[in-house]
Image (spheres, grey):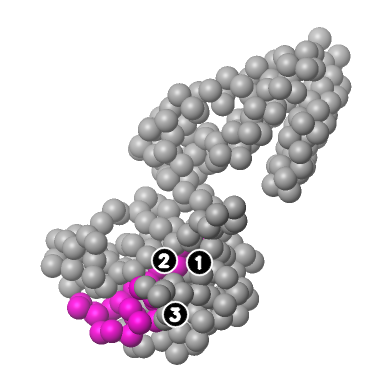
Amino acid sequence: MKEPIGHDRAKAILAQTRPQALLLTGPEGVGRRTLARWYAYGLNCERGFPPCGACESCRLDPHPDHLEITPQSGERQRAVIPVERIVPREGGGENLLEWIEVAPRFRKKVAVIDGADRLTEAAANALLKTLEEPPGHAHLVLVAGSRDAVLPTLASRSLEVRLNPLPEPQLRSITDDPDLLVFAEGAPGRLFWALEHPEEVRDLVRLVDALLLGLDDGQASAERLKELLARAKTGLSPWPFFRRAFAKLPPDGRAEALTFLVKLMEAHEAFVAPELLAAWGVHELRRIYGNLRPRAL
Ligand SMILES: [Zn+2]
C-alpha cells in the first residue's frame, strides 16, 4: 500500500465520514487512485485509519475485498466502461454487482470505478441502483476529473472529495529539479512519470524556448508549435512551460499571453486542425511579443 503524498484534509474527511458512495475528483496524476486505495485499505485495516501497513489485511496486494474497474478501449472508439462490467450479462464475466453482493473476507468490499465519466449510459444507470441501496458492507469509489463529467444522478448520491494540485514545496521532497516540478503542475503522478522520462520533459522545454526565441522565423515557429501540439495529444503537456515563460513578461503582455494560452488549449481540446492552430498561434505570439519589444529596447 502506497501512502498518498499530501491531501491531509481529504484523508481526514474519509477517515471520519467513511462514505459508502464517494466521488474523488481532481486532475490526472494528482493522487486520486492512490487515495482510493489508501481508503480501501483503511476500511479493512485492523487498526482503522490510517491503514497500518502491517496487519493481515494491509499485507495483501492484490486484496480480495478490493475491485478496480477501468475503461476498456474498443476499436476506433473512446475507451468506456460497458454495462457488463457493472451487472451480469450473458458471457460478460466478472461484474461489480455479483462481486459486491458476496460478503467480504475482512470487513468491507470496496469497488473503485476509475473513470466514472466513461460509464456508458446503460452502465451508469445500472450502477445507480447499487449506489441507491448498497449492501451494508459495500463501498463505492467513483474517480473522475470533475463532478460535471459524471452523470448528475450518480454525483448527487455520492460525497464529493476534490483533490487539488499540491503546493510545490510538498513535491520538493521528491526532487528539486525546476523543469520537472513545473511539468508536474502539483500532481505527484506526473512528477514520478517525469522522473522516469526526464529527457522527454527537457525536450519540451527546448522546443518551447526555441519557439519563443525564434518567432521572427514564422515557418520554423509554426513547425515547432505543431510539434508541441502533437506532443500535447500524447499527454506531454507543454502548457506549464508556456506559463513559466509568460510569467516573465511585463504585466500587460503577461495577461494577454495567458489569455492566448487558454484559447490555444481550448482550440486544441476541440480538435481544431494543428496546421491552422499553429499558424494562428504563431501569429498571435508574434503580435504579443512584437508589442512588447519597442519598450524593452
Ligand atoms: Zn492494517
Cα gap from disc 2 to disc 3, whole angstroms: 16 Å
Q: Amino acid at mark 3?
A: Arg
Disc 1 crowd rating (10 Å Cα; few below 14, some 14-19, many 20+) is many
Cα gap from disc 2 to disc 1, whole angstroms: 8 Å
> Percent position (x, y) of residue 285?
79, 26
In front here: 234 or 152? 234
Q: Magenta segment range?
A: 94-116
> Percent position (x, y) of residue 125?
56, 81
Question: In what element is the residue under mark 2?
Answer: strand
Can residue 263 be seen in this snapshot?
Answer: yes
Which residue, given by chain and number where applicable, does mark 2 sit on? 69
Q: Amino acid at mark 2?
A: Ile
Q: Residue 81: which numbered mark, if any?
A: 1
Q: Are marks 2 and 1 in contact (CB under 8 Å)?
A: yes
Disc 2 crowd rating (10 Å Cα; few below 14, some 14-19, many 20+) is some
> Percent position (x, y) of residue 215?
76, 17
Which residue, given by chain and number where applicable, does mark 3 sit on? 89
